[in-house]
Amino acid sequence: AAKSFLVEQRKSSVRGALDASMLERDLSSAMGEALGCGGHVDEKHLASIEAQLAPMWRTFPKTAEGNIERRSLRYLIHRHFSRTSALHIRGFEPSRPADASGWGSADILSQRVPAFVESVLQSKHKLELGFSLNDAAHVVATIEQLIYDFEGSVLEKVYRQQHKPLTRSLSSQGVEQLLESYMVHWLLGDDEEGIRLLLGNRSLIESTVPHWDQVVAFTKGLIRELDYKRRHLPNEALAAASARPGHNALAAKYSFEDVHGLVGGITKSFASFWESECASMKSALVAMDRHSTGRVPLSRFYSSALDTEWRFGESESYLRDLGALDETSWLGKQVIIPNYIQAASNCIVSSQHYLVCCANDCDGLLEEIENKVGAPTAEPSAILAIVGNMSSQTTLDDDFPPHVEGSLTRQLEQIAMAHGGMVPLHGRLFAQWLHYVFPRECPFPHKTGVAAAVTPYEFGENYVASDDEKKKHASEVNTTDIHTALGKEELQWMSQWS
């Protein structure tokens, strides 16, 4: 299953500078040449990607040529990786201005993935004609390959550090040692000093990386899964290139390509493994959300932080930059639960190419609406009928349809009035409406450029609130609790609507 995330075989690494004139050609050719495969991407793999994108694709507004614009393409790619692997690809963040271009346009490894992607997406040819479903599939395939190359470069580095030749097959014990070191490199990213310290002191790893013993067990489980496939599903193993003709399934030996496939599985499935931690964090926040508004008073947020070891410690300024702070309510500053859960501060892995974050609970809800509507727009009555039969299932106690009557119905009708009687499924106003229908699941969609996917390392040393700052806000918690008896409407809880 993990290999389906990767391009069929390990192609040449994307290391050369891209000829600017190439970007004027069809996107498929540009992507193929960038992959080092002569302009060709495996057709079966492309068809698989297109099938995954198709339900969303049907609900996007189209140009006269039946294509989508660059902004929609970026959102489509973001949703795809978020939904399938909880990956946030750098350069495709919804909060990023569509015409922002702060990277170079030549060598994609010396820059970042977005440097290459932006160059392609800004191709004059494509900006005029738009992007087809096949174009979108090529972008996905290219990003997959870039991720695969990135994993390979990190893995090669670990091989060198452990003085293991790339051509030598390893025992299961050797792979276990290799993967432990790889996980430290992968989790810490560019923090070379931190990597050096942790690899030099195993006890420090266990005290620094949350649930390290479970992380190690996770990697060992992937090795056992590969062994099982070799022994009991040999044809599938051959198709996935995790075994070779004549390979003795009982001989536990692993080539570099085998280990590379394992780390590909780590990238794709780690978010699912880490989901229990995300769920625990969300449960703690939901317990503090006494009005079911998807918001936690900043005073209560910091009061909780004083009683825990490492959760809920982001500074007020960092929360603001992340788009996780609501400062519009007369009740005072509040942390928006889904925006906080999705924030870069809670992404367990931060590489130069992507972030591995908590799953977006809104993806499944929006997907259900998209599948039932099957078009870019819908009448308010149709949306109300669909949403009225849905449930968020945040907890067992919340397993009931949302209340959409009253102000929420009026807001949806106003959106339709501004768009000829129909509601665009992928406009900011509908995303805003979904947030208020499912306030604990769907993030509040800030206007472009308001929020940023900034990691703690990128934000700087002030990303953590001082104890004095926490205590100052926490001292106001009793004042916040005075309003506990008020209902949602009395709280004017939709104060962020804009």
Image (cartoon, rainbow, N blue to C red):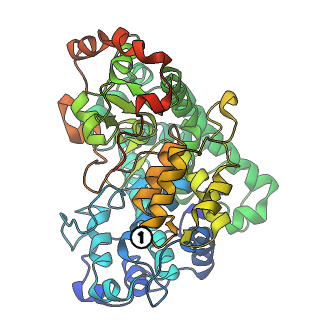
- Which of these two is toward me, 9 or 389? 389
Q: What percent of the width, then of the height, locates residue 285?
A: 48, 25
- How many marks are shown on the rendered structure? 1
Q: What percent of the width, then of the height, locates residue 67?
A: 46, 83
Q: Give the quadrant of residue 237.
A: bottom right
Q: What percent of the width, then of the height, locates residue 228?
A: 75, 49
Compared with residue 336, is residue 56 higher up or lower down, i.e. above or below? Answer: below
Q: Amino acid at mark 1?
A: Ser
Q: Give the quadrant of residue 4.
A: bottom right
Asked if residue 242 can be seen in this view, the reply is yes
Residue holding disc 1 = 72
* In the displayed structure image, the side of residue 117 where residue 394 appears, left or right: right
- Which of these two is toward me, 418 or 336? 418
* In the displayed structure image, the side of residue 468 where residue 198 appears, left or right: right
Q: In the image, what residue occupies the spot 51% across and 59% down?
A: 413
Q: Local crowd at mark 1 within 10 Å, few (<14), some, or many (≥20)?
A: many
Compared with residue 359, is residue 71 higher up or lower down, i.e. above or below? Answer: below
| Residue farthest to the right, as pictured | 232
Q: State the quadrant of the N terminus.
A: bottom right
* In the displayed structure image, the side of residue 477 where residue 54 appears, left or right: right
Compared with residue 61, is residue 211 higher up or lower down, i.e. above or below? Answer: above
- Which of these two is toward me, 13 or 384? 384
Asked if residue 267 can be seen in this view, the reply is no
- Which of these two is toward me, 312 or 109? 312
Label 1 secondary element? helix
Q: In the image, what residue occupies the spot 45% across and 22% down?
A: 206
